[in-house]
């Protein structure tokens, strides 16, 4: 009897260890979502969501908008052409390197004419603080430094930075001329990089209102620079999708990779 017990006990231990191993794998594969405080946009809300893996590493950083957010959006009022919605990052969850997100609603678009002059959203994921962003200006004595060209390693191959794409409280915009909107097709979505004083300090998916209203589900590759100015988790792809069950749009930085 004692011999039988000795044989049986290790078997239970091995079985338990195997079960614990499977449980650990399941836990590691189960993502956790951390959300920032929702902000009123249109008739709905928008918020930041960070999805983390079992090792507490960010897998995606997203702006999630309720379906009603596309209704009741403000129109141009006098000289006010852009409406800003500052979205806080989640208070919990893994660090991503992004300080805050600014969702810009452009009811009549912006320059270049014939390209981006359609209603659309600019989704800025800033690597600098809100105070630093507010101080960005391309006027006065510091204009030359503000508009300093970034190191070519900070600019993805093929991207251009037009001088007239410098915007106060925002930055200089690096554009991808290979986008459909520069090649005879209507603007739907594209990916922008932002610079100030020669440093890369935001990444930005852009998406038209019409494209969101089409209830899309797309994932596009991101053209990446050779290096970055700030330590953060940078996307290899971005996704624009609509979840009919939840009634939510998602604009996400995905397949994140750490850069120090």
Image (cartoon, grey):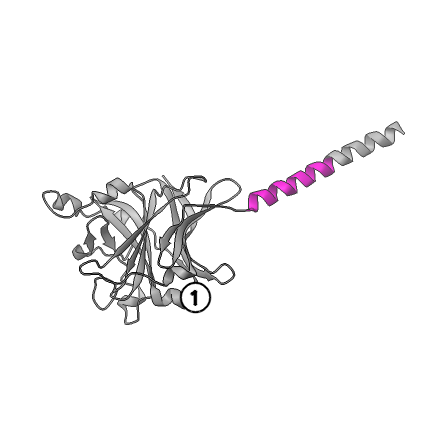
User: Where residue 137 sits: x, y (%)?
Assistant: 17, 46
**In the rendered view, does 242 fall on the left or right side of 113?**
right
Most foreground residue, 131 or 189: 131
As drawn, 208 above or below 27: below
Q: In the rendered image, which quarter contains the N terminus? A: top right
Quarter of the rendering occupied by the C terminus: top left
> Which residue does the image show at 31% across and 41% down from the upper left?
230
Report how many numbered discs are placed on residues in the image.
Answer: 1
* Residue sitting farthest toward the bottom: 184
Check disc 1 and report the residue beneath it.
Answer: 215
Magenta stretch: includes residue 16: yes
User: Which of the 4 image quarters holds residue 160?
Assistant: bottom left
Image: 259 above or below 218: above
Q: Residue furthest left?
A: 141
Q: Position of residue 20 (x, y in %)?
A: 66, 38
* Residue 129 place in picture, x, y as percent: 29, 40
The residue drawn where x is 56% and y is 46% is: 29
Is residue 196 in the magenta section?
no
Find residue 210 and report its image quarter. Answer: bottom left
- Majority SS type along the magenta span: helix
Q: Which residues are magenta?
A: 14-30
């Amino acid at each position: 009897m004692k011999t039988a017990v000795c044989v049986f006990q290790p078997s239970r231990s091995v079985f338990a260890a195997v079960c614990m191993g499977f449980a650990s794998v399941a836990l590691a594969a189960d993502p956790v979502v951390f959300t920032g405080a929702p902000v009123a946009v249109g008739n709905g809300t928008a918020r930041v969501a960070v999805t983390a893996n079992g090792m507490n590493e960010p897998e995606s950083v997203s702006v999630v908008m309720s379906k009603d957010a596309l209704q009741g959006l403000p129109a141009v009022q006098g000289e006010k052409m852009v409406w800003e919605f500052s979205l806080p990052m989640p208070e919990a969850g893994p660090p991503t390197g992004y300080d805050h997100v600014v969702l810009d609603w452009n009811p009549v678009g912006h320059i270049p004419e014939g390209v981006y002059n359609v209603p659309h959203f600019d989704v800025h994921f800033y690597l600098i603080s809100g105070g630093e962003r507010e101080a960005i200006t391309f006027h006065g004595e510091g204009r030359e430094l503000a508009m300093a060209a970034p190191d070519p390693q900070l600019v993805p191959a093929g991207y251009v930075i037009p001088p007239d794409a410098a915007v106060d409280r925002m930055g200089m915009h690096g554009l991808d001329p290979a986008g459909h909107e520069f090649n005879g097709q209507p603007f739907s979505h594209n990916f922008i990089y932002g610079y100030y004083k020669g440093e890369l300090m935001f990444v930005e998916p852009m998406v038209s209102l019409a494209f969101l209203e089409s209830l899309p589900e797309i994932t596009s590759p991101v053209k990446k620079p050779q290096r970055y100015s700030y330590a953060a988790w940078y996307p290899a792809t971005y996704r624009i999708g609509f979840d009919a069950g939840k009634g939510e749009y998602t604009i996400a930085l995905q397949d994140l990779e750490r850069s120090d």
